[in-house]
Image (tube, rainbow, N blue to C red):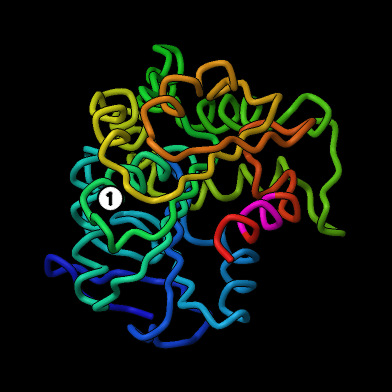
Amino acid sequence: MRISIDNNEVYLYTNNRTPDPAKPSVVFVHGAGFDHSVWTLLARHFSRLGWNAIAVDLPGHGRSSGESISTIEGMAGWLQRILETLQLDRIALVGHSMGSLIALATAASLGNKATHLVLIGSIAPMPVSDPILDATANKPNSAHTMLTSFSFSKQNLLGGNPNPGMWMIADSMRRYETEISAALDIDMRACNAYTDGLASAEKVGCPTLMIHGDADRLTPIRATRPLMQAIPDSKLAIISGCGHSLMVEAPNEVLDHMKQHLL
C-alpha cells in the first residue's frame, strides 16, 4: 500500500489489505538500515487473525521516498501522521532496536490510542560506539559486516536458520546492502543522539512487553533496567541463545510472546 506523507510516497506492507479503522491495528517499525521486510512473517500472521497489520518503510528506506529523518522525535512525528491519515485509533506498536525508540516516543504521544507496546532489543539511552559511527560514515561495507557480526549470538554466527534454505548472516548483509548507504549512518546517529527515551517511557500508558535475547551484544540485557523501571506497566521476556536480531534468530518465540501480550 502506498500513501503520501509530507509530499513523499510512503510504502506500507499490509498483506494486500486496506486498513479498516474498525479493527485493531498492529504497527511494526524496523531498525536502523533495514525496511519493512524484517516483519513480513509476523505481520502476515496478525493479518490472518483479523488485525490491520502494517509494517512501515521509514523515509529513505525500502520503498519509501524522501530523505531519511535524522532524529527519533522526527520519525515518531512522521509515524503519527501516518496513523492519522489511516484514521486508526486502537494501535499496538511494535519496534525493533531504533524502531523501538520510535515506537516508544509514538506511544508516549498517542495517549489511550496506544493499546499495547512491544519493544524488541531495546534500551534507553541507546548509545552507539565511535568505531561503529566511523564505519557507517566512512566505510559502509565494514559497517555492514561489523553490525551483522554483533547482531547475532555467537552460536548463530556459525550458520543455520529456522527457515529452511535461508542463511541468517547473508540475509542481514543483503538487507544492509540494498538500502541507501547514507540511511544507516543517519539512523545510527539518531539512536546515539536520542536522550528523551526515559522521559517518553514515563508517559506510556499501555501495557508494554520488552523482548530481549540473552546474548545481545548491541543492546545488552543488563542495560534494559532503566527503561523497564521507567515504563509504568512493563515486563521482560528473555529468549535464550539469541542476540539482537531476534526476528531472524527466533521468529516463532518472538511471535509467541507477542501473541500472549496482544491477544
Q: Would residue 256 be counted in the magenta stretch?
A: yes
**Left-right relation of 92 to 78:** right
Query: Which residue shows up at 26% across the image and 46% down it?
Result: 108
The kind of residue on which mark 1 rests is Thr
Secondary structure predominantly adopted by residues drawn in magenta: helix
Per the rendered image, the range of residues in magenta is 254-258
Instruction: Let me know if residue 138 appears in the view.
Output: no
**Left-right relation of 10 to 225:** left
Query: Which residue shows up at 46% across the image and 31% down it?
Result: 140
Image location (x, y in percent) of residue 78 = 21, 57
Image location (x, y in percent) of residue 76 = 25, 49
Query: Which residue shows up at 78% across the image and 32% down it?
Result: 240
- Under circle 1, the secondary element is helix
Above or below — where is 9 with respect to 94? below
Image location (x, y in percent) of residue 72 = 26, 39
Q: Residues within 10 Å of mark 1 (few under 14, many from 20)?
A: many
**Left-right relation of 121 to 137:** right
Q: Nearer the viewer, residue 169 or 121?
A: 121
Residue pointed to by mark 1? 106
Query: Which residue shows up at 45% across the image and 13% down it?
Result: 131
Q: Would residue 116 be counted in the magenta stretch?
A: no
Q: Tell me the quarter of the picture where residue 256 sits.
A: bottom right
Q: Quadrant of the N terminus?
A: bottom left
**Left-right relation of 224 to 29:** right
Give the total of numbered labels.
Answer: 1
Instruction: Name the residue at the front extreme.
Output: 233
Q: Tell me the quarter of the picture where residue 8 sits.
A: bottom left
